[in-house]
Amino acid sequence: MRKSLLITFLSACFLTSHADEGMWMLTDLKKQNAAVMQDLGLDISIDKVYCPEGISLKDAVVHFGGGCTGEVVSVEGLVLTNHHCGYSYIQQHSSVEHDYLTDGFWAKTYAEELPCEGLTVTFIDRILDVTDYVQEQLQKDEDPEGLNYLSPSYLEKVAGRFAKKEKIKTDDFTVLELKPFYGANKYYLFVKTVYKDIRMVGAPPSSIGKFGADTDNWMWPRHCGDFSIFRIYASKDGKPALYSSGNVPLKVKTHLTINANGIKEGDFTFVMGFPGRNWRYMISDEVEERMNTTNFMRDTVRGVRLRVLGEEMAKDAKTRIQYAAKYASSANYWKNAIGMNEGLVRLKVLDRKKAEQERLLAYGRETGNDSYRQAYDAIRQIVAKRHDAVYHQQAIYEALMLGTEFSKVPDTDELLKALESGKKKAIDEAVSALRTKGAKFFNKDYSPEVDRKVSKQLIALYARLVPSAQHIGIFKVINERFGGNTDAFVDACFDRSIFSSPEALEDFLAHPDKNQLENDLMVQYACSVKEGYRATGEEMKAETNAYNRAHKTWVAGMLALKQKEGKAIYPDANSTLRLTYGKIGSYEPADGEEYLYYTTLKGVMEKEDPDNPEFIVPDKLKELYRTKDFGPYAMPDGRMPVCFVTATDNTGGNSGSPVFNAQGELIGIGFDRNYEGLTGDIAYNPQLQRAACVDIRYVLFIIDKYAGIQRLIDEMTIKKLF
């Protein structure tokens, strides 16, 4: 019954939704969104946006590295994304001698483009609604625990069966992804092509790409040129391939046209990308849980970690480069958590959620459907019951798993087994394997001394945040051998462990000893952290399973209610390709305040602070500003645009997303949300939520006038009428 209701509704033309809200499935655009989008200003056929039988704009939008979005802007596979999306790869290639983070990087030729180990770019070839097929498989397959409907491993098997039935060929580069939507009331299969030879082409210095850094992060107005440039390489016959010096730039199916004519208030825009996660169907109890567990831990733990890392990074260039990407990654959702909690209180989101859930409960009473009340009661009970386990798991994750790097020392089980067996061949093989893993652990971006200092703070913080009766197993060692002194324990780890340094590991591997391995403190700590995290998950396994079943019913009810009320329905974000649309516009964050929809280079100069590394302005950029040498990229009044905001419904994963105008031309690159809109992951606010974007004219200006890389400008298709 719920299935037919959902499918019937999705087939209806959706004319009454608020245009800006929604992360829409491309497969539903023609049925559900085309008329609204065209009424708002879309000036092209929806088939040019997404066409399952032909080439469309969708085919130039890529999943960049699995966590961001990118867009193809040339026949030769040139990809634009954010500076912060490419940051770890810029850092990967940086050193004290070649500090691309500080100085920027620009390849003047194909030969200078740098391969990025581990980076992938993924195209979505097909999107298939396989709901009926999945439900058929669910009905005929054994499912003792009743969990197949959400199980990634089970859904992977079903995807394989479907591919075999439909003769869809897969390999290391053509892969399938089957995911549940709408609380597992619907299923889509994505057929994807993955390219694994990706090279860095260009990146502005961090003083441009990361201008404002943590101070301005999640804020508006913004003045950063948050972009970087990569290129997709393929074999000579155009096929995806692993890195090879003989690979060539990929000749793509299609690429985007860039419109450098500029923007104005009220312009229609749409964005395609891969938003990661949001939770629009939470009840109020879940919102409170999020505030008091995940967000609390991110704020509390990361604040301490960032302070210590910042102090260490300020001491020397090597440490700054080593920890630049780790610091940026940690800081991003530290500030997000703070802003979200503030916004949830300020905007009375709990009251809105309570009103929303009361409407559904009333609807259930009106229609004689008691399943919604039962689901609601179950979710409330589950949230209350699992609170301590969720809180503890988040403490372990933030403080011990993410915070203490030595929690990730290589697994030593195989060597221990080999030593117990006494078999020389097995020992030699295990030693060789551990040596390889050790080399990866002791990479160029790891400093034992920094890890020691951070770990002292975070293990002690964990001990204060979590009741002693719940402490993970290693605290028995800390209490019995070190009198509860966590600093002494950390010092012992870094002074005596086989993983205290590359040299210590090599000394041990030269003469491996079973007793030494069993008593190694770092090894014991790493095992304890993993076991503690697993145990908290196991502790709430029954609640998690019950929650998933109740949530499925609750979401089905919300969909039915929204149908009755004529409101938008769309699935929560789950890192799959989506489209969102809205208009460029200023907004009022508070009474008497107004933020314009755009910023200019003048604002960069006004924010300059040579004593603050977050607000340094490069001399060349200042000279270009002084001489007004903006080339053809200036606004009609002569000012140089930098960023703009538009009312599209974005979240994490949309970083790097192309921002299109009404003609489907690239006008910007999405990179952030505004502080007032951080509650949008849970509840959308059309008056306040905005997506911050780099104006494509600023991107072109930096490439052309600042970096002087004319070959990249020539490679792009750029439309400018004046």
Image (cartoon, rainbow, N blue to C red):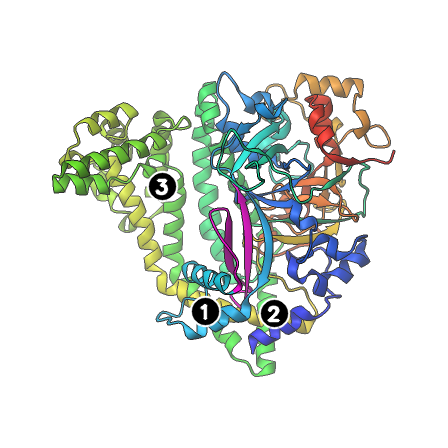
Q: Quadrant of the C terminus?
A: top right
Q: What is the tally of numbered marks visible in this picture? A: 3
Q: Under tag 3, what secondary structure? A: helix
Q: Earlier in the sequence, mark 2 or mark 1?
A: 1
Picture residue at 55% right of the left edge, 56% below the top: 190
Q: Earlier in the sequence, mark 3 or mark 1?
A: 3
- Disc number for residue 400: 3
Picture residue at 27% right of the left edge, 23% below the top: 503
Amino acid type at circle 3 is: Leu
Tag 2 residue: 559
Above-or-below relation of 346 to 332? below
Name the spot of residue 33 as percent of width and height, x first.
72, 61
Tag 1 residue: 549
Q: Quadrant of residue 424?
A: top left
Q: Is residue 64 left or right of residue 51?
A: left
Above-or-below relation of 506 to 54? above
Amino acid type at circle 1 is: Arg
Magenta span includes 171 = yes
